[in-house]
Image: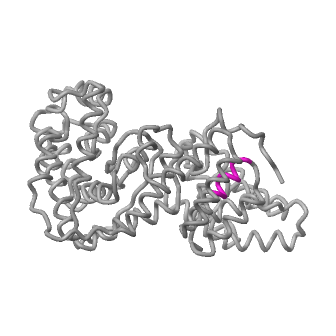
């Protein structure tokens, strides 16, 4: 059993929720958490169902304290952890998601691209990504550096963008009506964002040249929009949301929000914070008390995460497996278990079984460095030469030109190994 020194997390990033993602030219990170992904997927499913959206909506969760969500030029919704922390209930988050889905459903990105092409005033995606991102809030420095100084940014284009933002706000409010629910939480969220931006010097004059309407106009719109007489507030959703929010608060240093949490969510966030600060014993004691009185199976995963971060891999694996009993599709728990399999003393036949039984993980997370490294270890023991060549290449990829990457990938397609061919084909199709 490996064990890291107590207190080792005090000066390092608490990595429980995060995995490195390997692309063909760089490493990047995002939050990969099954609990929050499942929850957001359900909220988006509710949104697209009542609005009869005929599109697949993809999303990513970013590790950022900025209270923000936006749609990128590929119509992928990005959700910052800071947004979740400042939502007072699940309806606030649902409203923001509906706003972003509205941009996609109403083809706002496509319209912006078309306008840019028609006017021929923009020739870089760098500007487009700032202007076209349907952000809930704007960073003043980004605005000044990328928008205000862009000589080609016309007043007509800003007005057009404000109209789109108002359309997206209306889309979100109509979605709440269709779901027969309403909440003041989105108004509270908008007021919170406005106040924080004002504190940073983002005045009303700066809002005028922003791509978004005035916050007071957006708040008035929410206040005056036709309300439902019934309030179909989903308590089960909100319970799940509060655990997710508490988890993110625990990983952050946001004392303000932590102090406002109700129990048991406050104790949950504090148990994570204790682990981050090196107090494993008290963290586990508090977490065990919460687990005794709650049926949330993801509490077991959090316990596993904490144990894992301190080097107690065998104990962590036990709790990851308990989580998988209820959530067998929790791939991140599967990865934790897989990457910590000790193969040194295994026979070749047992090693081959592990190699074959985890191929679905490899196909799905071919860009996860931990999965690739474990497969490299398995291939090395089994002397799978073609696999070793492939893993050597894919793990060494960094700042490589796309033409070279594509050429090498094409060469690997000459393999007679059907499993390797499947993996290479998946990577080729994505890139």
Residue 184, quarter of picture: bottom left
Magenta stretch, main secondary structure, is: helix
Q: Is residue 153 visible?
A: no
Percent from the top left, x then y, of residue 270? 55, 46
Q: Which residue occupies the foreground of this view, 316 or 115?
A: 316
Q: Is residue 194 visible?
A: yes
Q: Is residue 306 magenta?
A: yes
Residue 26, quarter of picture: top right
Q: Which residue occupies the foreground of this view, 407 or 144?
A: 144
Q: Which residue occupies the foreground of this view, 332 or 317?
A: 317
Percent from the top left, x then y, of residue 413? 62, 64
Residue 48 lies left or right of residue 209; in this view the side is: right
Residue at 23% in and 70% down: 179
Residue at 30% in and 38% down: 130
Quarter of the image with the N terminus is bottom right
Residue at 75% in and 61% down: 386
Residue 3 lies left or right of residue 120; in this view the side is: right
Percent from the top left, x then y, of residue 59? 40, 57
Count of number-bearing discs: 0
Q: Vertically, is 199 above or below 379?
A: above
Q: Vertically, is 322 above or below 370?
A: below
Residue at 80% in and 47% down: 3
Percent from the top left, x then y, of residue 224? 8, 54
- Which contiguous range is marked in magenta? 303-310
Q: Is residue 187 magenta?
A: no
Residue 25 lies left or right of residue 391; in this view the side is: left
Q: Vertically, is 8 above or below 321?
A: above
Q: Which residue occupies the foreground of this view, 280 or 103?
A: 280
Q: Vertically, is 109 above or below 424?
A: above
């Amino acid at each position: 059993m490996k064990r890291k020194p107590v207190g080792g997390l005090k000066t390092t990033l608490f990595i429980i929720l995060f995995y490195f993602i390997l692309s063909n030219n760089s490493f990047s990170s995002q939050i990969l958490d099954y609990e929050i992904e499942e929850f957001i997927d359900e909220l988006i499913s509710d949104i697209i169902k009542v609005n009869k959206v005929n599109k697949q909506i993809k999303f990513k969760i970013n590790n950022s304290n900025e209270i923000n969500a936006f749609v990128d030029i590929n119509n992928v919704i990005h959700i910052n952890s800071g947004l979740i922390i400042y939502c007072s209930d699940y309806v606030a988050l649902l409203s923001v998601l509906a706003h972003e889905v509205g941009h996609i459903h109403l083809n706002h990105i496509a319209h912006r691209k078309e306008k840019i092409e028609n006017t021929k005033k923009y020739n870089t995606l760098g500007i487009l990504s700032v202007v076209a991102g349907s952000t809930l809030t704007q960073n003043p420095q980004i605005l000044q550096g990328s928008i205000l100084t862009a000589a080609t940014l016309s007043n007509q284009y800003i007005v057009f963008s404000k109209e789109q933002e108002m359309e997206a706000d209306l889309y979100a409010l109509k979605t709440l009506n269709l779901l027969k629910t309403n909440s003041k939480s989105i108004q509270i969220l908008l007021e919170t964002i406005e106040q924080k931006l004002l504190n940073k010097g983002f005045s009303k004059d700066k809002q005028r040249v922003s791509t978004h309407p005035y916050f007071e106009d957006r708040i008035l719109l929410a206040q005056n929009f036709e309300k439902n007489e019934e309030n179909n507030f989903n308590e089960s959703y909100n319970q799940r949301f509060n655990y997710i929010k508490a988890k993110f608060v625990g990983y952050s240093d946001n004392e303000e929000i932590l102090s406002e949490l109700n129990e048991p969510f406050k104790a949950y966030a504090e148990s994570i914070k204790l682990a981050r600060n090196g107090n494993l014993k008290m963290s586990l004691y508090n977490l065990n008390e919460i687990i005794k009185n709650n049926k949330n199976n993801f509490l077991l995963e959090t316990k596993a995460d904490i144990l894992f971060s301190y080097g107690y891999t065998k104990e962590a694996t036990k709790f990851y497996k308990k989580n998988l009993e209820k959530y067998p599709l929790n791939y991140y728990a599967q990865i934790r278990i897989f990457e910590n399999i000790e193969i040194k003393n295994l026979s070749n036949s047992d090693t081959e079984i592990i190699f074959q039984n985890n191929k679905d993980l490899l196909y799905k997370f071919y860009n996860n460095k931990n999965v690739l490294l474990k497969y490299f270890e398995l291939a090395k023991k089994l002397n799978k030469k073609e696999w070793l060549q492939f893993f050597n290449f894919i793990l060494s990829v960094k700042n490589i030109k796309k033409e070279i990457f594509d050429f090498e990938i094409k060469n690997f397609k000459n393999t007679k190994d059907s499993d390797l061919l499947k993996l290479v084909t998946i990577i080729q199709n994505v890139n």
